[in-house]
Image (cartoon, helix red, strand yellow):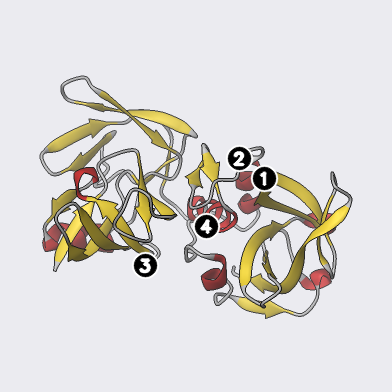
């Protein structure tokens, strides 16, 4: 088994081994993974954090040993807490990183990948926060454009949004909405929910394709065109701009 770590800011993770293939997610700086299949120019990987699988360009990650992979997997992750910030290498070169990027083996304002040392002066996140922080964190991403497969302030999809918000508060969600819907406890009514609970929505074939974070007073924050706030009722999401329902409610889950 081979192992790798992302040593670039934001790298696409694709469904097939091609630049033309759909982007299923993104790999952020410091995320480590198993290499399931190594090809000439692409590798199929499984990200440790959420078990998301896809293909990554071999030029866009660095191989690590099994020992390093296990050390990273068993240690408490330290995340970048700034929407956008910089890492500085010892030679003075800069790399941008988005919020939620991992800072491997972070200590004394330095992170380490292989033989490289990166200095980081920004705020960090390394502890579990109360449920009350979920909505406050979600507000950081208001107006972020919707971007299929995205999970950064430059562009994000609905499940990338919920996953990142929970991650920044120290909680783990799977990558896709239909996978997240398998987590937590089912709630029967909106009235039973609390701010921070998740609402899931399905398509005409009954497949869960969308997710948002419930707020107080029957509002929901979600990524649809952009990260926005709409009304939530027993039918689904009522778009406050178009004055119509855009998503059909399937289930409400309490994750924490």
> Label 1 belongs to which residue?
225
- Which label belongs to residue 51? 3
Q: Is residue 90 above or below residue 20?
A: above
Question: In front here: 3 or 41?
Answer: 41
What residue is shown at x 49% (from left), y 48% (from top)? 150
| Residue 23: image location, x then y, percent | 43, 53
Residues under numbered marks 2 and 1 in contact, where contact means CB atoms less than 8 Å apart: yes
The residue tagged 4 is: 163
Calculate the distance from the C-alpha at mark 1 to the C-alpha at mark 3.
27 Å
Q: Sequence-wise, which precedes: disc 3 or disc 2?
A: 3
From mark 3 to mark 2, how far is it between C-alphas? Answer: 25 Å
Seen at 36% across and 53% down, the residue is: 13
Q: CA distance from mark 4 to mark 1?
A: 18 Å
Determine contact: label 3, label 2, CB under 8 Å.
Answer: no
Is residue 185 shown above or below 90?
below
| Pointer 4 local density, CA inside 10 Å: few below 14, some 14–19, many at least 20 | many
Between tags 3 and 2, which lies in front?
2
Q: Is residue 90 left or right of residue 17?
A: left
**Mark 2 secondary-structure assignment:** loop
**CA separation in Å, label 4 and label 2:** 16 Å
- Please tell me which residue lies in front, 28 or 22: 22
Pointer 2 or 1: first along the chain: 2
**Residue 47: % across, % down:** 32, 61
Closer to the observer: label 4 or label 1? 1
Splitting the image into 4 quarters, where does residue 191 fall? bottom right
Q: Nearer the viewer, residue 245 or 254?
A: 245
Residue 215 as seen in the image, left or right of residue 25: right
- Which mark is in front, 4 or 2? 2
Dot 4 lies on which element? helix
Task: Indicate the position of residue 164 as horizontal and vertical percent values.
Answer: 51, 52
Q: Residues within 10 Å of mark 3 (few under 14, many from 20)?
A: few
């Amino acid at each position: 088994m081979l192992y790798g770590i992302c040593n670039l800011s934001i790298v696409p993770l694709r469904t097939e081994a091609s630049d033309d293939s759909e982007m299923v997610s993104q790999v952020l700086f410091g995320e480590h993974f198993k290499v399931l299949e190594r090809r000439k120019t692409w590798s199929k990987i499984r990200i440790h954090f959420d078990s998301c699988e896809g293909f990554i360009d071999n030029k866009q990650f660095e191989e690590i040993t099994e020992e390093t992979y296990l050390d990273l997997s068993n240690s408490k992750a330290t995340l970048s807490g700034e929407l956008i910030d910089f890492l500085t290498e010892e030679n003075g070169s800069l790399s941008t990183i988005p919020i939620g990027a991992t800072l491997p083996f972070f200590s004394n304002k330095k992170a380490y990948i292989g033989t490289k040392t990166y200095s980081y002066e920004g705020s960090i996140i390394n502890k579990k926060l109360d449920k009350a922080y979920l909505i406050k964190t979600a507000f950081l991403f208001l107006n972020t454009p919707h971007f299929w497969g995205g999970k950064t302030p430059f562009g994000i999809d609905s499940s990338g949004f919920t996953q990142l918000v929970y991650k920044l508060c120290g909680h783990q969600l799977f990558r896709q909405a239909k996978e997240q819907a398998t987590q937590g406890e089912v709630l029967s009514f909106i009235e039973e929910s609390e701010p921070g609970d998740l609402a899931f929505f399905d398509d005409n074939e009954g497949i869960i394709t969308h997710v948002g974070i419930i707020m107080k007073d029957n509002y929901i924050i979600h990524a649809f065109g952009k990260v926005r706030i709409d009304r939530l009722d027993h039918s689904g999401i009522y778009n406050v701009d178009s004055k119509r329902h855009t998503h059909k409610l399937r289930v409400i889950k309490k994750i924490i």
